[in-house]
Amino acid sequence: MTVEQKSTPLIDAQGLHTYYGESHILHGVDLTLMPGETLSLLGRNGMGKTTTLKSILGFVPPRRGEVFIKGVSATKRRPWQLIRQGIGYVPEGRGIFPGISVREHLIMAARPNDRGESPWTLERVLDTFPRLGQRINHDGSFLSGGEQQMLSIGRALTTNPDLMILDEATEGLAPLIRDEIWKIIRAIKATGISTIIVDKNIDNLLSIAEKHLLLVKGEVVYSGDSQGLRDNPSILETHLGVA
Ligand SMILES: Nc1ncnc2c1ncn2[C@@H]1O[C@H](COP(=O)(O)OP(=O)(O)OP(=O)(O)O)[C@@H](O)[C@H]1O
């Protein structure tokens, strides 16, 4: 990565106003992520976390505001063009297709990054997720919830992303499997990939993410680091009910 790439935000979203029909959901959300950073998006159900991700990715384009990805305006781009720019998206619900094997899931999206490098080979993904190797020929939809989540993360890694977006990656999983997913998220961070995480486990988020954005009814009520949240516990108490 060049010095210029390191000092250009991976994501720079400013003043996002997003609607579903007449429902005004995001009210001026700003989000900036530098290369290598991990950011958590916090907020109770329905506060606009997924909508923020979808606005950045262009699935639900904002009516007002601007999104720059690696310094280039993304406002008029289609989601698949953004994914080709190095964003690995692990959606809520995992996006696993019935009738398609684990191997096929892991090769269908594989591509080098925009610098022509492919650090995440199929072998490396299978080393990271040995369970997927054991089920390589199984239909993806027959895997357990935790294995499907690993497959969804593994598939995103095969696109050799600079940024991973993980929406509720541990939702509905047994505690041991959740721990496994958190270990993998930490391992991904250690490789230098930036991450945006939506999750309910505050302790893990406070230790993994350097930055946090807390949304209430589509507005940012906290934007800052973990220390700021630890020093002001009333912020999490008030807006997330975390004591
Ligand atoms: N496709 C849609 N059409 C209409 N309203 C929607 C749609 N998707 C979400 N909403 C509404 O937008 C608001 C924000 O939803 P969003 O999914 O962004 O919240 P969230 O913070 O991600 O919460 P959750 O954890 O429940 O997914 C909610 O009021 C939700 O009902």
Image (cartoon, grey):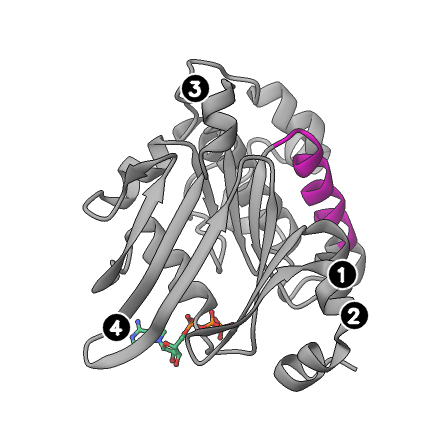
Q: Kindly indicate the quadrant of the structure image that contains residue 121.
A: top right
Q: Residue at x 46, y 48 (%)?
A: 96
Mark 4 to mark 2 CA distance (whole Å): 34 Å
Magenta stretch, main secondary structure class:
helix
How crowded is the residue under tag 2: few (<14 C-alpha within 10 Å), some, or many (20+)? few
**Residue 78: % across, % down:** 23, 44
Task: Give coordinates of residue 4: x percent, y percent.
Answer: 46, 23
Whichever of callouts 4 and 3 sits on the residue coming sooner in the sequence is: 4
Q: Is residue 176 left or right of residue 135?
A: right
Number of the label disc, if any, that sits on residue 231: 2
Callout 2 amino acid = Asp
Task: Mark 4 vs mark 3: give the one in front.
Answer: 4
Residue drawn at point x = 32 percent, y = 49 percent: 67
> Which numbered mark, 3 or 2, is in the foreground of this view?
2
The mark that comes first in sequence, 4 or 1, is 4
Q: Which segment did they paint magenta? A: 179-192
Q: x, y percentage for residue 115?
A: 42, 16
* N-term-proximal mark, 1 vs 3: 3
Determine the quadrant in which ligand 1 lies. bottom left
Q: Which residue is mark 3?
A: 112
In reply to whether residue 183 is colored magenta, the answer given is yes
The residue identified by callout 4 is 19
What is the spatial separation of the Cα atoms under label 3 and label 2, in whole angstroms? 42 Å
Which amino acid type corresponds to the residue marked 4 in the rendered image?
Tyr
Instruction: Residue type at mark 1: give it.
Output: Gln
Element type at mark 2: helix
Pointer 1: what residue? 227
Q: Position of residue 106 (x, y in %)?
A: 49, 31
- Amino acid type shown at disc 3: Pro
Q: Nearer the viewer, mark 4 or mark 2?
A: 2
Q: Whole-Å distance between the Cαs marked 4 and 1?
A: 33 Å
Query: Which callout, 4 or 2, points at the residue further toward the start of the chain?
Result: 4
